[in-house]
Amino acid sequence: MRVVMTPHPDMSGGAIHSIAVEVTRPRADTIDLRYAAEGDMTRVRIPARSEPARRDELWRHTCFEAFLRPPAGEAYAEFNFSPSGEYAAYSFTAYRDGMQVVHGAAPEISVESSAARLGLHATIRTQDIQAVDLMGAVRLGLTAVIEDMDGAKSYWALAHPQGKPDFHHRDGFALDLPTLEQT
């Protein structure tokens, strides 16, 4: 399915005019996300390509994110995907509480860019998230932080709660992925 993000209502999209995500779940233990940001990429600060590695605070610069939780309960997982190829994965027991680094959950990331488009493809293996049961139905929050060359940031999401940008808020988990039968 294809979904479209919007910039936070209190700020402009900066150099970006649209971000769409193609979401597929080819197996019960896999979620594929294909982010496509369109706009003037010459005005976007895109982190330089590096070796794939886990790194904290990717949200401080241009990155794409996914928040996943089962339909019931408070626990959720967060993934950050940088165009550099770096990533981060965390689990939470409740809203911004009980944060733990998730080790061994390296997503596969590939990136394509041009003057008018930045594409990032990330594959998440849900069985790698031991602290949160994501093998059944999943609620997704898809987000992006876009940093312009002047350092200004725009915050994109499928849904924004009231107030300042808050990607962890329950209202941001706006997409349902159904359970898939194991074959």
Image (tube, helix red, strand yellow):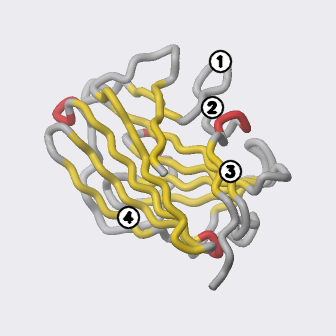
Q: Position of residue 101 (x, y in %)?
A: 64, 62
**Residue highlighted by disc 3:** 139
Q: Could you say which quadrant of the image residue 50 lies in?
A: bottom left
Which of the labelled discs sits on residue 16, or is there none? none
Q: Disc 1 versus disc 3: distance between alpha carbons?
A: 22 Å
Q: Residue at x 23, y 55 (%)?
A: 112
* Distance (Cα) linking label 1 and label 2: 8 Å
**Residue flagged by tag 1: what amino acid is it?**
Gly
Distance CA(mark 4)–CA(mark 3): 21 Å
Per the rendering, the mark at residue 163 is 1
Judged from the image, the secondary structure of the residue bearing numbered disc 4 is: strand
Identity of the amino acid at label 4? Answer: Ile
SS of the residue at dot 3?
Answer: strand
Q: Are marks 4 and 2 in contact (CB under 8 Å)?
A: no
Q: Earlier in the sequence, mark 4 or mark 1?
A: 4
- Residue at image mark 4: 109
Quadrant of residue 161 within the rendered picture: top right
Identify the residue at horizontal 37%, vertical 59% (top origin).
121
From the viewer's perspective, tell me whether residue 91 is left or right of residue 62. Answer: right
Observer-side mark, 3 or 2, equals 3
Left or right relative to 77: residue 25: left
User: Of the residues shown, which amino acid type is indicated by label 3?
Assistant: Arg
Query: Which quadrant: the C terminus?
Result: bottom right
Q: Are marks 3 and 2 in contact (CB under 8 Å)?
A: no
> Is residue 47 or residue 130 the one in the foreground?
130
Secondary structure at numbered mark 2 = loop
Label 2: few (<14), some (14–19) or many (≥20) C-alpha neighbours in 10 Å: some
Q: Is residue 119 above or below residue 52?
A: above
Q: CA distance from mark 4 to mark 1?
A: 32 Å
Mark 2: amino acid: Asp
